[in-house]
Amino acid sequence: MERASVGVLERPLLKYSELANLSPEEIGEVAKKYAPVLMPKVGVDYKVYIGKPPELREGERLVAYTLSTCPHCYALVTAALYEKEGKVYERKVCPEHGEFEELYFGNYATYERFRKWQKDGKGVWTPNAQLAALCPFNCGLCPRHKSHTALLNIAVTNRCELRCWYCFFYAVKAGYVYEPSLNHIRFMLREARRMLPYPAIAVQLTGGEPLLRDDIVDIVRIAREEGYHHIQVNTEGIRLAFDPDIAIKLREAGTNVVYMSFDGVTPFTNPKNHWEAPYALDNLRRAKLGVVLVPTVIKDYNLHEVGAIIRFGVKHADIVRGVNMQPVSIVGRVPKRERDKLRVTIPDVLLEIEKQTDGQIKREDWYPVPTVVPISRFVEALRGRPQFELTTHFACGAATYLFWDDDGELIPITRFVDVDGVMQLLDKAAEEITSGRNKYVVALSVLSKLGRYVDTSKAPKRFRSKRKFLRYIFNILVKHDYSSLGEFHYQALFLGMMHFQDPYNYDVSRVQRCDVHYAMPDGRIVPFCTFNVFPELYRDRAQKFFSYEIKEWERLTGKKLAEEVYVRNVKKLMEGEPYKRAYEGVADVLSIPYEEHVLASKKFGIPVAE
Amino acid sequence: MKVKAFNFSASLREPHPRQVAVETIVYAANGGGLRRLECWERGFSFELDALDFDAEFGDVLQLTTADVVRGLAGGSFECRVSECAAESALLKVYNVVLNGRNYKLMAAYKPAEGRLSRVYADIVTNLAPWEERVRVVSKLLGLPPRALENV
């Protein structure tokens, strides 16, 4: 059996232009009617072969078993995670397509250090999908899911002005336009707000390129109206570079931060927006709208620049709030030897960062995402109601906070805060309150002890005042609100790492704990790593179902899809002062001949105005 | 109509340590009271039982087949599956020991469209006081609360 096609449900069962004008409630009725029909079907879309796990070979040591999928046909199979030569690998066998072996985590010691922080969530008490199939073919979220939505993604369009060589997702290639109406988006936002024990409060508007929508500012406003505290817009930054007003309008409507693709500091590693990023940063600066740089890290492509990317972030720290690296997720069928050139995992990137920052940011400075759960549990114990908590799988992501001194020395938070100690203190305090001890007494005790875990003599000069630093921690712990976090953010650079899965390293244990979700047009809420890893079964199937035919969309909007192509004027961009300034001290981009700049852009798929 | 019940103990290492033991008692709810059902017992099969196991404990205990598979390396899983013939509404009572703590949890089932549908389940991460749960379950099953006194 080969992979299912999107066309298991051939459109058009409904005409989207008619649906688009309905109210959110009416759209909800239609959407929910079709959601069960759009679900993956066993025997049609996938098979189940769970049984005996693959055997280990000489020199391999078992770490865990898990459920995974065949990269070719999506069959559910049992996989073994094993340690060999200090790394963790995944092996699985599909009865139809044979054995697959993939690097799962590049360092076993880091795996074990991270694993100790694993904490599970409270589940989802208001599932949107009935339990009718095994994971990951029942997403919606179903009653099995362990984490509430920490970040909701809404794809607001599949249009894009770039034609990146590897992308098959954008409207022209897909053959339809997915662009949910404002009421449809409101319906999706509301579905995630209904979630218990903790409703979604953070949303990322994504695409395609979301800034291609003329009503993107209205969408941000709607998200605010629906109760979202944190709104971020995910963009390649082209529009931000050329339209100074859009950044201001986005901020005024309630956007908290922009997530901007940024894969490197040279034209060769970042042909997507190397030339535009400096202008986008300047416009964001004027708008006072913070930005998180989002590099996709690929082994033989830009892994050698991870240190430089961080230095670029520090250089622009007045407006760059963070750098969130994403080790590549290998989609499509890629032969093993090709995958080996691309594959990096979190520990591999951490090691490179350590090397490229001359040991200023060490591997030990990073902690897995669920490390911060004790903060949530402590606040929950104080307040007596469920709190926002990041209970994703330990292998999914890592983070740290980075500070710096005027002489350029990078100082991760772990150099002056005993993170292990603080979290153990909070864990114990939460347990004490839950067991019936007076919460005010416990809280006072925590606050009095916090100072023991901070050594301000090792902190950046501006934090040498212990009182000042403890005030930040106190605000975050006690207030647990965004203003406290925001204030902290402005003094530091958030460094994050999120390794989204792919069919080769898939792990059901991770996806059951996923807290980065997509709102689907049919009302389901689907983990990132089912939405994008099985596009034919989730993303493309649902989006195609609720889409316009291209001709119809062009008739309704008066636009021509094929004409929405960005043509880059490399010469003009290189001559601008923002460009010259942006990379100074990080990479000598001006010494690269113009012709090589042009070639880099063209090779990537972005035409250049001669 | 057939219904499954799982009696199991698991010691799981990955991704975090968990010790869990569950004894399931199945009661038929009719005639204003509860009657313990006699069931036929067999071994657990991933092929036959994975989905039912998930449906039963995925939310109630936050425990799924994927968790069991994951945790088996260096861990253990002993499970007996009871198959019971049911004519009417059902109450399942789970006597649970989870990481050293004892819980008594309930799930209620009612016949609908030729099969039994779960209409109520306690979730270990969201437990109301016992009396309140008894009140809700007894109402759903059309029983007086005292019928649940000795479960």
Image (cartoon, coloured by chain):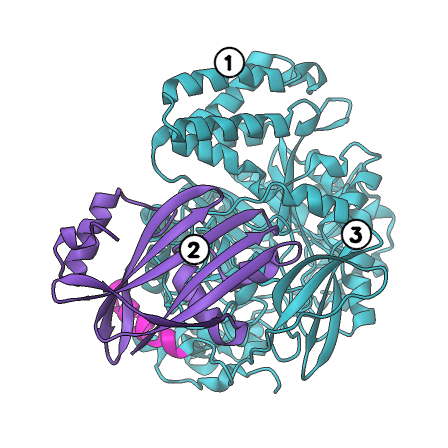
Chain colours: A cyan, B purple
The boundaries of the magenta stretch are: A19-37
Q: Dot 2: within a 10 Å radius of its alpha carbon, few (fewer than 14), some, or many (20 or more) residues?
A: many
The reply to the same-chain question for discs 3 and 1 is yes
For the N terminus of chain A, the quadrant is bottom right
- Of marks 2 and 1, the one in the foreground: 2
* Label 3 element class: helix
Quarter assignment of residue A554: bottom left
Q: Residue at x 58, y 44 (%)?
A: A118
Q: Chain of mark 1?
A: A
Mark 2, residue position: B22
Mark 1, residue position: A448
Q: Dot 3: within a 10 Å radius of its alpha carbon, few (fewer than 14), some, or many (20 or more) residues?
A: many
Observer-nearest residue: A380 or A286? A380
- Of marks 3 and 1, the one in the foreground: 1
Residue A303 tag number: 3
| Residue A29 is covered by the magenta coloring | yes
What amino acid is at disc 3?
Answer: Leu
| Residue A445 is covered by the magenta coloring | no
Q: Is A7 drawn above or below residue B87 in the view shown?
A: below
Tell me residue B58's x, y (percent).
43, 59
Tell me residue A191's x, y (percent).
34, 58
Q: Is A591 drawn above or below residue A400 in the view shown?
A: below
